Image (cartoon, grey):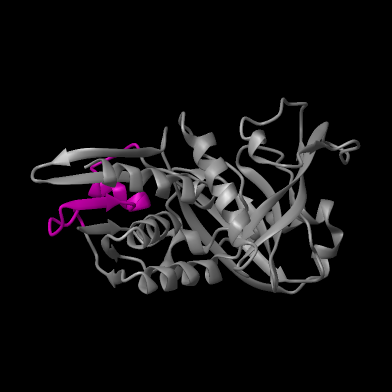
Amino acid sequence: MRVIVVGAGVIGLSCAVRLAESGYEVGVFARDLPLETTSAVAAAIWYPFLSAGDQVAGWARSSYEEFGKLAASEPSVQLRHGKEYLLEPAKDPVWADALPDLRRVGSPPPGFRDGWSFTTPVVEMPLYLQYLVKRLEAAGGTLTRAALSSLPNTAEIVVNCAGLGARLTAHDPTITPVRGQVLTVQQFGLAEWLIADRGPQDLCYVVPRSKDVVVGGTSQPDNWDLTVHEKTAGQILDRATELIPQLRKAKVLRHRVGLRPARPEVRCESVRSGDRRVIHCYGHGGSGVTLSWGCADEVLELVREG
């Protein structure tokens, strides 16, 4: 059976890989190729963010398990320990049961009253997206650039993973952009990640990778601006260097902006459209990587249900 997947970000590629490796004839069509997507900008630490829905915790747990397996053989996936600092005391997160080593931080830095530490997958997206494409092609799938204003009608099943493009492909105005700006600096020996947000829009996260460190960021709803703003970059770096002073001397390599595809609730469901079935899988906010394999498994089951 032929299945068309629309979208080549981490959600689309993960779904396509699952389907192709399960014996389906899969073609991925996307306006933006993988390294041009929002996924390529992401710091890509496993951490549910800007995503809602009853199934989010389960999808996150499944993805954590899958990334744990991949970390044993795929260099673009690493398990890294780190800390999150909180402004106020909080209960354990609903996804805590996915983590083998969640611990409370005894003495958070000034300005913070709580925190926890845990080990989580960190995914180096420029490398990982290429890894997914290779897996897709090895399983017989294809990837084609195509600017689509609507879903194709040349397959019995279409999987809509268009992210913000779902405003067109699903006629869904509830999916909106949340602007994220980040910068990367040269790796200076940092091994642990850090999250320490002081407000809903002024994020602070520092995520080490093999050759660089991603420093973020922003969370600006309903903002379509893809321009890098120098003032914002300075504010991002200032927030991070308060907690990790070594960042101040690190060489800045690049600046990036991505638009997270946010929605009141992640949509992952099958609907009938004429003589074909459409499986919608979009609206993952800042949790594309975190939910990717869980949602791919869900999409596979929906395809199998017929």
Quadrant position of residue 253: bottom right
Which residue is nearer to you in this view: 142 or 43? 142
Q: Is residue 132 left or right of residue 105?
A: left
Q: Is residue 160 left or right of residue 50?
A: left
Asked whether residue 232 is in view, the answer is no
Q: Which residue appears at 65% of the width and 34% of the height?
A: 97
How far across and down, in percent of the image, does residue 122 sit? 64, 58
How far across and down, in percent of the image, does residue 3 sit? 23, 57
Q: Is residue 155 magenta?
A: yes
Quarter of the figure that contains the C terminus? top left
How far across and down, in percent of the image, does residue 187 sit? 75, 71
Q: Residue furthest right?
A: 107
Q: Residue furthest front?
A: 23
Q: Which residue appears at 37% of the width and 62% of the height?
A: 21
Asked whether residue 263 is in view, the answer is yes
237 shown above or below 199: below
Quarter of the figure that contains the N terminus? bottom left
How far across and down, in percent of the image, does residue 126 sit? 53, 70
Which residue is nearer to you in this view: 129 or 239? 129
Quadrant position of residue 274: top left
Q: Is residue 257 left or right of residue 232?
A: left
Which residue is nearer to you in this view: 119 or 203? 119
Badge count = 0
Q: Is residue 77 magenta?
A: no
40 shown above or below 261: below
* Magenta residue span: 149-174
Q: Which residue appears at 27% of the width and 63% of the height?
A: 26
